[in-house]
Image (cartoon, rainbow, N blue to C red):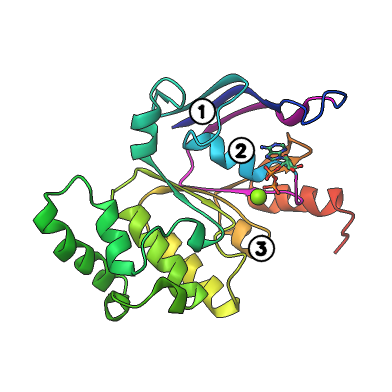
């Protein structure tokens, strides 16, 4: 279970005369559903919320825990439990080829087993033939699948994905949605694709750093549309 308890995230002002900026306020959530979508306007605080879940960001006050592991006190355990998929896979792929990148994720295996295991994981995702290609020569969809393979290599219990389909074309968006749908992990994802959001068991709407709506996809998405002034 993922728990956010009375979370507030505040960043200090950049200039002395400015006010501190409140990125999230008054956020308390218990997330147990298999698929939770987070939606909201640009700048509403979605990424801030997702980054709290793997400890990339610390709450200014309040607590965030994953299966009882506190993201501040048990940071290493939380990082092992929660895999993070970025919007832009190039933000995540550290090595120059898929094989090297997945191999890097397999640090817990004995060194001589890593390469073969990495090739096996790429094969399972239908990416085996791309193992030695430069990550810059992959399509956006292939790149996002390689990033997902690297994240899954360490067998996280939870996947957090921040707008994972935003940079993809329609076909690749559907392909990634299917790939995520098939995973056994609990997945918390943000998206502007309201069809993708509707796949979730629960939708959380963020507005100005606060939870505006939270519940069944249909109702939460409707609330979001109304808040955006879209009446269709
Ligand atoms: N480190 C930071 N310092 C100052 N402002 C930030 C920082 N990170 C995010 N913000 C601001 O917080 C707000 C929410 O950002 P974010 O969580 O990225 O929103 P979203 O993902 O919904 O677009 C935005 O106004 C953004 O500019
Ligand atoms: Mg964002």
Q: Which residue is mark 2?
A: 49
Q: Which residues are magenta?
A: 19-43
Magenta stretch encompasses residue 124: no
Residue behind label 1 places its C-beta within 8 angstroms of ligand 1: no
Q: Position of residue 121 (x, y in %)?
A: 25, 65
Res 26 seen here: no
- Mark 1 Cα-neighbour bin, 10 Å: few <14, some 14–19, many ≥20: many
Q: Which residue is mark 3?
A: 193
**At x 15% / y 49%, what residue is drawn?**
109
- Mark 3 Cα-neighbour bin, 10 Å: few <14, some 14–19, many ≥20: few
**At x 41% / y 71%, what residue is drawn?**
135
Tag 3–tag 1 contact (CB < 8 Å): no
Q: Earlier in the sequence, mark 3 or mark 1?
A: 1
Judged left or right of residue 184, residue 219 is right
Residue behind label 3 places its C-beta within 8 angstroms of ligand 2: no
Q: Position of residue 102 (x, y in %)?
A: 29, 60
Q: Nearer the viewer, mark 3 or mark 2?
A: 2
Mark 1 → mark 2, Cα distance in angstroms: 12 Å
- Mark 2 Cα-neighbour bin, 10 Å: few <14, some 14–19, many ≥20: many
Q: Position of residue 107 (x, y in %)?
A: 22, 47
Q: Which residue is mark 1?
A: 3
**Closest to the observer: 138 or 49?**
138
Q: Quadrant of ligand 1?
A: top right
Mark 3 → mark 2, Cα distance in angstroms: 18 Å
Q: Earlier in the sequence, mark 1 or mark 2?
A: 1
**At x 59% / y 19%, what residue is drawn?**
62
Q: Earlier in the sequence, mark 3 or mark 2?
A: 2
Name the quadrant of the C terminus.
bottom right
**Which numbered tag is attached to residue 163?**
none
Q: Helix, strand or loop at disc 3?
A: loop
**At x 15% / y 65%, what residue is drawn?**
116
């Amino acid at each position: 279970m993922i728990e956010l308890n009375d979370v507030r995230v505040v960043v200090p002002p950049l200039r002395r005369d400015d006010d501190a900026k409140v990125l999230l306020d008054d956020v308390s959530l218990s997330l147990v559903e298999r698929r939770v979508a987070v939606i909201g306007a640009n700048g509403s605080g979605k990424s801030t919320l997702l980054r709290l879940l793997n400890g990339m960001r610390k709450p200014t006050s309040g607590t965030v825990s994953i299966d009882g592991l506190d993201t501040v006190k048990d940071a290493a355990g939380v990082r092992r439990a929660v895999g993070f998929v970025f919007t832009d896979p190039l933000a995540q792929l550290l090595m120059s080829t898929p094989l090297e990148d997945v191999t890097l994720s397999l640090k817990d295996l004995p060194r001589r087993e890593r390469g073969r295991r990495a090739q096996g994981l790429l094969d399972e995702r239908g990416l085996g033939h791309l193992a030695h290609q430069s990550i810059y020569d992959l399509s956006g969809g292939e790149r996002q699948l390689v990033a997902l393979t690297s994240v899954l290599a360490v067998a996280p219990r939870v996947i957090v994905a921040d707008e994972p389909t935003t940079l993809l074309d329609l076909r690749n968006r559907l392909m990634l949605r299917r790939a995520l749908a098939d995973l056994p992990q609990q997945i918390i994802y943000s998206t502007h694709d309201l069809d993708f959001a509707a796949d979730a068991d629960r939708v959380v709407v963020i507005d100005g750093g606060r939870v505006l709506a939270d519940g069944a996809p249909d109702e939460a998405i409707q609330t979001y549309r109304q808040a955006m002034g879209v009446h269709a």
